[in-house]
Amino acid sequence: MSNENVLEVRDLVTYFFLRRGVVKAVDGVSFDLKRGEVLGLVGESGCGKSLTALSIMRLLPKGSARTLRGEVRLGGENILTRSPREMREIRGRRISMILQDPQTSLNPVFSVGEQLREAIFRRRQGTKAEVMQEAVGALRRVEIAAPDQRIGQFPHQLSGGMKQRVVGAIAISGQPEVLIADEPTTALDVTIQLQYLKLLKRLQAETGMAILFITHDFGVVARMCNRVAVMYAGRIVECGPVAEIFEHPSHPYTQALIASVPGMSGTVGGRLTTIDGQPPSLMDLPAGCRFAARCGHVEARCRDAYPPTVTVGAEHKADCWRLGGQ
Amino acid sequence: MTPEQASAEPLLRVENVRKYYPFGKGILLARTLGQIKAVDGVSFSIRPGETLGLVGESGCGKTTTSRLILNLETPTAGEVLLEGQPIHNLKGEALSAFRGKVQAVFQDPWSSLNPRMTVGRTIAESLIVAGWDRSRIAARVEELLDQVRLEPAHAQLYPHEFSGGQRQRVALAAALASRPRLIVLDEPISALDVSIRAQMMNLLKDIQAQDNVAYLLVAHDLATVRHMADQTVVMYLGKVVEHAPTHLLFDDVRHPYTQALFSAVLLARPDQLEEEIVLAGEIPSPLSPPSGCRFHTRCPLAMPHCSSTEPPLREVSPGHRVACHLYEIDNGSVATAGAATSVELKPD
């Protein structure tokens, strides 16, 4: 464990066990999150990015999903072996999470103040007035105008952007070391999205927390992240500093993904680069590289065995045979 | 856009349409308290084979505008004309003929297809209604599947057997069945995965080139509009704030709201970060839109009279129309955005 990593995930494996078969949603994911950095986790829907986050938080859907292997080391200790009771103490204080839809993360029958107070109370005891004052302060920190009035209001009286701010205030009220943000701005309008991203950046600078930022949008990555990990069909296929990934993507999937997004400059019209086909079924994964069926550079060995992780630059790694694997 | 298109008679004309929804209190003894002005005086036209992009944030009236064009809503005032014919008083056969000419593809391919109908039947639906005979329908369905790059065998399958991208292509095939002149595309790619979006955009362009069908593209993603549309209309709280050919608009953004919208587009290039304009506050409620210019509460360049006088949509350069007091003609010259902050405005 190096001192600069606040979170280390090693070979995390989470499957869904269904009657129809086993869905290998997270299949050997490893990454480090450094203190005070923003790491983007990018991928398409169904690639396992949200399930990776839920596995780290140990909030898997009850019943079918199970984490089989791996380690999640928070500050050096593996939290996967902690009891559910200990885990409850860790969640909110050391690691917390913001979900995509603020509508469903807040309880509609409790006021904003009551929901904030609950989060604050779990951390420290105090008189009602003290806690209330801290709750107002928490709303002010997330730049909610007129917090004294807002504190008594219910979620339906707030706009989507404001609700997501309240969720953010609750998530950081325990001063966590790690914040997992799972597509926090996808449900917001573009001008509101920019406001929210700036707010997250500011809060991060103030508190020094590390953020694992899950998104499918490369624009958000460019604006928010220091490093980015690209996920495909249950595995991280490429990971590196943001500028490196944008300028020299090494994995064919990352290359195609970046090329297929229409830009705001350059010639208008023309054809976009496409990625043909679809991701493989997670119930029936190929033996070799998971992108082989859609890859333009596919070779025989790609179909036979999963490629090695190759270091292609400083802190920049990719899983591809063409990069000089043996 | 080719020169013939430029000179062609517009296919669709939207003339100063308004749609107000009354809102009230109570069920028994209901009182009307006011009106939500969802669309408040919108005009534009679309030529055959052309794409018009309609951009704006939630609540700006872009969906209501598209529903007015689809004849799913009746306007409070104003008119929509297709090929010179007003569409909102059509009845009987004329209405059926209109439905064949104007079709729609919606955002969510999971809810827009009937899960109990085979894909072939869904595509054939409008042909059955139009009274085609069976053998011709089968041939046409096969042709349509081929046009959207699906296999003839797919006609036998049900929607749940398809991926999101394939379903959206089925919805497109169903829309194309009656050989429409105009397709309303309401966020056609935003529910699709990033790697599938490019396929869909290319397909839409190919079909337009083949069939000369016009598109009304309702979208919030500016990069998509830039890629697809010939002209772009930007809406804010029920009003058009800027309207220009896409290449003009994207080279020279005039309205402060459009500028903020452009700045909020997160470019997928870390090195292209420009000076960003972060708008203060939220979109005001359409229940009580601000007086004067509806954007003045969030506008970084607002001037005193913006809150009292509403700026009309006027042409600031050939083909480029903007509704903003910054571009009022001052001593015969048009103020530019950069200089606008220092321009002295004559009192109204």
Image: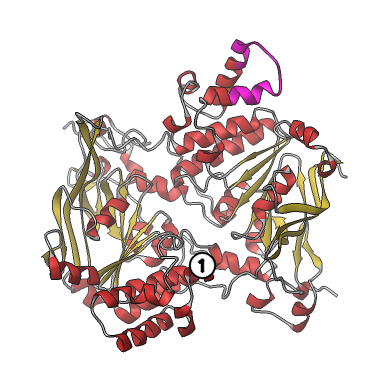
Residue B189 drawn above or below residue A226: below
Estimate the x, y position of residue A109 in percent, counting from the top left: 50, 28
Q: Of residues A267 and A269, which is closer to you in this image?
A: A269
- Residue B48 or residue B116, whichever sits in front: B116
Q: Position of residue A277 (x, y in %)?
A: 58, 75
Q: Is residue A225 left or right of residue B228?
A: right
Q: Amino acid at mark 1?
A: His
Q: Which residues are magenta?
A: A116-131
Residue A290 in the image: state x and y as whole percent.
70, 71
- B237 relative to A12, above or below: above
- At horizontal 71% and vertical 23% (from top left) the residue drawn is A123
Q: Quadrant of residue A289?
A: bottom right
Residue B1 seen: no
Q: Name which residue lies at 72% across and 35% down.
A: A91
- Where the N terminus of chain A falls, by quadrant? top right
* Label 1: element kind: helix
Indicate left or right for A297 with A313 as reference: left
Residue A206 seen in the figure:
yes
Q: Which residue is mark 1?
A: B160
- What secondary structure do most residues of the magenta stretch adopt? helix
Whether residue A124 is in magenta: the answer is: yes
Looking at this view, is B272 or A98 the one in front?
A98
The one nearer the camera, A306 or A153, is A153
